[in-house]
């Protein structure tokens, strides 16, 4: 019984860390239990704190986003994903005005 209570408490704490682990910085950040979705403005230099690390849009060229996540620079095409600093980084959408990125632990 004690083990079950400890596991339940740990699960709740982990969920709270993931939900509250995202922060804004001029971009729209939406976090849930399965990670954070960040909508970067395509123009300008925006950086956010996501799950305890900094994520920044470096640039976009030919439907491919250059991002810096946890100090690691990666290039990800729309619909693609890669690993950076122990996180999965996926580019969901690139438009004329914004870039939508998904970051998961």
Image: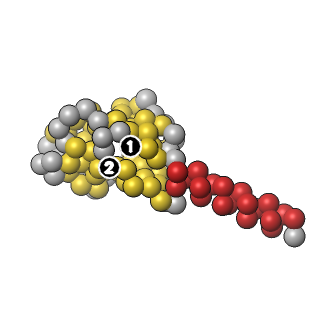
Please tell me how crowded label 2 is: few (under 14), some (14-19), or many (20+) other residues with Cα within 10 Å: some
Residue at horizontal 52 percent and vertical 47 percent from the top = 21
Residue 18 located left or right of residue 84: right
Q: Which residue lies furthest to the right in this view?
A: 1
The answer, for residue 11, to whether it is visible in the render is yes
Pointer 2: what residue? 28
- Determine the CA span between mark 2 and mark 1: 6 Å
Q: Nearer the viewer, residue 43 or 75?
A: 43
Horizontal and vertical percent for residue 49? 43, 39
Please tell me how crowded label 1 is: few (under 14), some (14-19), or many (20+) other residues with Cα within 10 Å: some
Q: In the picture, residue 76 is in which quadrant? A: top left
Pointer 1: what residue? 24
Q: Which residue lies furthest to the top in this view?
A: 71
Tell me: residue 18, above or below residue 1. above
Dot 2 falls on a residue whose secondary structure is strand
Labelled pair 2, 1 in contact (Cβ < 8 Å): yes
Residue at horizontal 22 percent and vertical 43 percent from the top = 41
Horizontal and vertical percent for residue 39? 29, 50
Tell me: residue 74, above or below residue 1. above
Residue at horizontal 73 percent and vertical 64 percent from the top = 8
The label on residue 90 is none
The answer, for residue 64, to whether it is visible in the render is no
Tell me: residue 11, above or below residue 91. below
Horizontal and vertical percent for residue 47? 34, 35
Q: Nearer the viewer, residue 7 or 86?
A: 7
Residue at horizontal 29 percent and vertical 36 percent from the top = 46
Residue 105 located left or right of residue 92: right
Dot 1 falls on a residue whose secondary structure is loop
Protein image colouring:
secondary structure
Residue 21 located left or right of residue 100: right
The N terminus lies in quadrant? bottom right
């Amino acid at each position: 019984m004690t083990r079950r209570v400890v596991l339940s408490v740990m699960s709740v704490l982990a969920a709270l860390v993931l939900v509250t682990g995202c922060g804004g910085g001029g971009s729209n950040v939406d976090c849930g239990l399965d990670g954070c979705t960040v909508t970067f403005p395509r123009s300008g230099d925006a950086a956010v704190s996501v799950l305890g690390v900094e994520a920044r849009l470096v640039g976009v060229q030919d439907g491919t986003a250059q991002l810096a996540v946890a100090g690691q620079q990666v290039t990800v095409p729309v619909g693609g994903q890669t690993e950076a600093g122990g996180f999965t980084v996926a580019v969901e959408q690139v438009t004329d005005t914004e870039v939508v990125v998904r970051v998961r632990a």
